[in-house]
Every structure is written in structure tokens, then in C-alpha cells.
Amino acid sequence: MNDMHRTNDLRHVIEADRAHVWHHLSQHKPYETVDPRVMVEGKGMRVWDATGREYLDAVSGGVWTVNVGYGRTSIADAVRDQLVKLNYFAGSAGSVPAALFSERLIRKMPGMARVYYSNSGSEANEKVFKMVRQIAHRHHGGRKAKILYRERDYHGTTIGALAAAGQDQRRDQYGPFPDGFVAVPHCLEYRSQWGAVENYGERAADAIEAVILREGPDSIGAICLEPVTAGGGVIPPPRGYWEKVQDICRRHDILIHIDEVVCGMGRTGAWFGYQNYGVQPDFVTMAKGVASGYAAIACTTTTEAVFALFKDDAADPMSYFRDISTFGGCTAGPAAALETMRITEEEGLLANTIAMGERLMAGLHALAERHPVVGDVRGKGLFCGAELVADRATKEPAEETRVQAVVADCMAHGVIIGATNRSLPGLNNTLCLSPALIATPDDIDRIVEAIDGALGRVFG
Ligand code: PLP
């Protein structure tokens, strides 16, 4: 902690926050009696708040973002150097870091070719929705404009992205939404819609095809899926799912959009989540981990075939992608992303993610043996979840307030974890863990210990 912190000079900061800051995703009533939490400093896996309390952060900045950990001076230096050279120019021109990062990124994504820059995951996804609609207008006579999305997936906070949200509580009170977005069934085998079936993955993929046939294949342009569902409860795809989804989409000429906003840049142990499952997308979007939260950046990547659909008629003034994102021209994002990628490579963070992810999963399985409230354990790389149930036989979800009590108890014991939170009616019962990719065995063990203690205290 720095001197300012030690002298407890931060009281006025907490009061300024209480008086003027509107926190994301937060009910403010409690702040009338309890201080809002204000974060001050971070180093590696640890953060300190304005009261000087230290936390081990098991969710990479709260929302699975700070993949390479806090306090990376080399990223700060790269951003500073870039800012003094050229901080900004509109994205209708290129910039040195955008060109170089695009080149490196595309090398990690065989089959992809182009990178379109913006600022947030929501925005990156909105770009795809616009591209799909423009392709429909220009190449399919206005048909094929619908977009499929999956129950329990989430693609962002804007009205368009919420129209594609498979989490009803996130949409509640924010309608009306634009037309043209159609839900397909989730793929969580633990809560199988068809009882105990063999080949659940194929069955869930068939359920997508049933929606396509109901809607009419020539009305559907794309499907938007998370490679591993994140905030909807950490749901890795079941065996056989992606192969069949890909086959169905190819047969019906439906473009595949994979939302890697959470999984991208190493979270699952591969550069991109989809690369674990042998699927070849047409669009990939990414944001959070791309620059590890050191600067705002989001990317919409496409194949050359998709790109070609927008440059096929130079004589037509309306044929190109008529979209702009002012701050997509900021150079800090790609500068920070280049250094984040270098760190990820040079420190072997993908291999660490696989090893530490296995340790975390083993720890969670051990908890399931001791605590009957743990109904299911799921994960891929350093992205894991434990679903809590009131009754293992019926799988009745644990009460949301008690799940939140586990999160609060871990926080009180110095470990920040997450949980599905007011997104799925009746199913906000999954603890979510996404430590930075630099996690050590000690960090993982401490996270598991904290959950162990919390489950004991909350559920007895
Ligand atoms: N896509 C997924 C899978 C997400 O989890 C999120 C945010 O949590 C988003 C998109 C939206 O990203 P952003 O908050 O940067 O707009």
C-alpha cells in the first residue's frame, strides 16, 4: 500500500463516491448505512480497497477481465509511449498499434482475416448484428436478417445486444426490443430439457435445427453463441455439440458468430474458446481480456469471405460497412493489447491456465464431496463454476440470497468470487470463478479454502 493509503486519506473519496457515483449493477440503498467499496490499488492477483483491506481476486476485476493481473508496468509503459506519439485518429484511417495487433491477432485465429475496432463487448456484438443485416439486404433480398441466440447466453448491455440475451432478468423492464432475434435452447446437460438422454450434445444441437426449420432457414442469417456460456452459469458445451451445430449452420447457410468477450485471449487455456471445439466461425467478437482492462478495446473479427461481401461493389456508395466507433480509433487499446499478448506468450500463461484450471476443478470436486449443496461443478481452463442446490435429487436451486451470502462471506474473508446474479429467474445459483491467468497453486488453494469455509458457514 502507498503512503496515501496508510494515512487513511481516502475517507473523502468514499464520501465523494457515496454522493456522486452511480455504481454498475448495484442497488444503492445499502450505501445509506454501509460504505460503498472503492478500489484503490492492485498488484498481481491482489487488490486493496480504500479502507486498506486486501483481497485475493478470483474473478479478474469482478467481471473476468484482468487476465494478466494488476500492476503491469510494461503495459502502462507501452500505452504511455503510444499516447505521447499519437493518442487518437478516427478509425477510417489506420494506426501503427492497430495494424500490428491485427496482424498478431489474426495469426492466432486461422481462417479469420479482418479486425474491426470498437470499445466494448456489447459494441463488438452490435457490429456483427449490423453486418448480418446488411448482408441480408445486399445479398439475400432482405431475407436472412434474423439472428439466433441461446438461452442463458449474454451478449451485452445495449438494447440490440439485450434483444439477443438469453437471460430474462437482464431484459426485464428494458423493452421493447428490436425484432429479428430468436432464442434456441440452452445446452446445460445438468438441467437437461429432455431428461437423461444419451448424446445430450447432439440433442441440444438438433433443438437448434428444429428452431431453424420452424422459422425457415432462409429467414436466418447468423447464430450468436458463447463458446462457454459465462454469466449464464459457466456452461462448457456438451460433447458432440459444436460439431453438429457447425454442420447444421453450414447446411442452412447460417453464419456462425462466436462471442469470445469472456473466453477470448486465453481464459479457457486456448487463445480462443472455440478453438477447443474444432469449430470454424465466420465472426468472432472479443473485449475484456484483450488488453486485460489496461485500456478499452473490443474487436469484431471476420473471415475474408465475410469482408468481401462489403467490398464487392465499389461503384455502389452504400455497399461498404457504414459504421463508425469514435473511440475505436484510440491507440491505447491496441498498444495495451499487443503487450498483453506478449506477456501471455512469454510467461506461458496458456499452459498455466490449463494447469491451474485443473487444480481449481479438482478443488471444486473435492468441495462437492464434502458439501451436499454443491450439485454440479463445471469449467474449462481458469473459468469454473459450482452450481448450488437445495436438494441434490431434485436439483432444486439453492436460494439466491444464500448464494449471495457465500459470495459475501468469501469477500469478508478476503477472497472475491462471483455468482450468477439476477439474470436467470430462479437459477441464480452458480458460483463463478475466473482468476487471472497468472494464478499460482497457492492462490487456487486459498480460493477453494475460502469457498469451503463459506459453504460451511452459510449452509451448515
Ligand atoms: N458478451 C459476453 C459473453 C459478456 O459476458 C459480456 C459482458 O459481461 C458482453 C458480451 C458485453 O461486454 P461489455 O460489458 O464490454 O459491453
Image: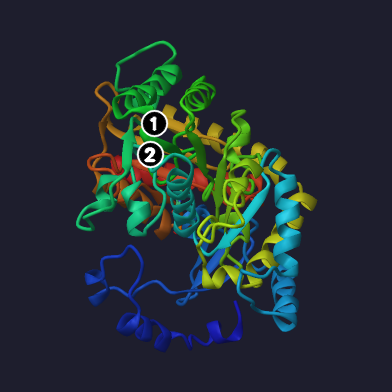
Q: Is 126 located above or below residue 207 in the figure?
A: below
Where does the image place residue 193, in percent across and percent down from the top left?
29, 22
Query: In the displayed image of the protein, which residue is found farthest to the right?
Result: 346
Among the 4 quarters of the image, the one containing residue 76: bottom right
Among the 4 quarters of the image, the one containing residue 430: top left
- Here the colouring is rainbow
Determine crowd level at label 2: few under 14, some 14-19, many 20+ residues with C-alpha closer than 10 A: some
Marks 1 and 2, how far apart at CA: 6 Å
| Side of 146 where 358 appears, left or right | right
Q: Quadrant of the N terminus?
A: bottom right
Where does the image place residue 221, in percent across and percent down from the top left?
43, 38
Residue 290 appears in the rendering: yes
Q: Earlier in the sequence, mark 1 or mark 2?
A: 2
Residue visible at 26% across and 38% down in the picture:
398
Among the 4 quarters of the image, the one containing residue 83: bottom right
Residue to which mark 1 is pinned? 218
Q: Quadrant of the C terminus?
A: top left
Q: Secondary structure at mark 1?
A: helix
Camera-side residue: 272 or 75? 272
| Side of 248 where 105 appears, left or right | right
Q: Secondary structure at mark 2?
A: loop
Residue to which mark 2 is pinned? 143
Where ligand 1 lies, by image quadrant?
bottom left
Amino acid residing under circle 1: Asp
Q: Is 94 located above or below residue 410 in the figure?
A: below
Determine crowd level at label 1: few under 14, some 14-19, many 20+ residues with C-alpha closer than 10 A: some
Residue visible at 26% across and 35% down in the picture:
397
Tell whether label 2 touches label 1 (CB within 8 Å).
yes
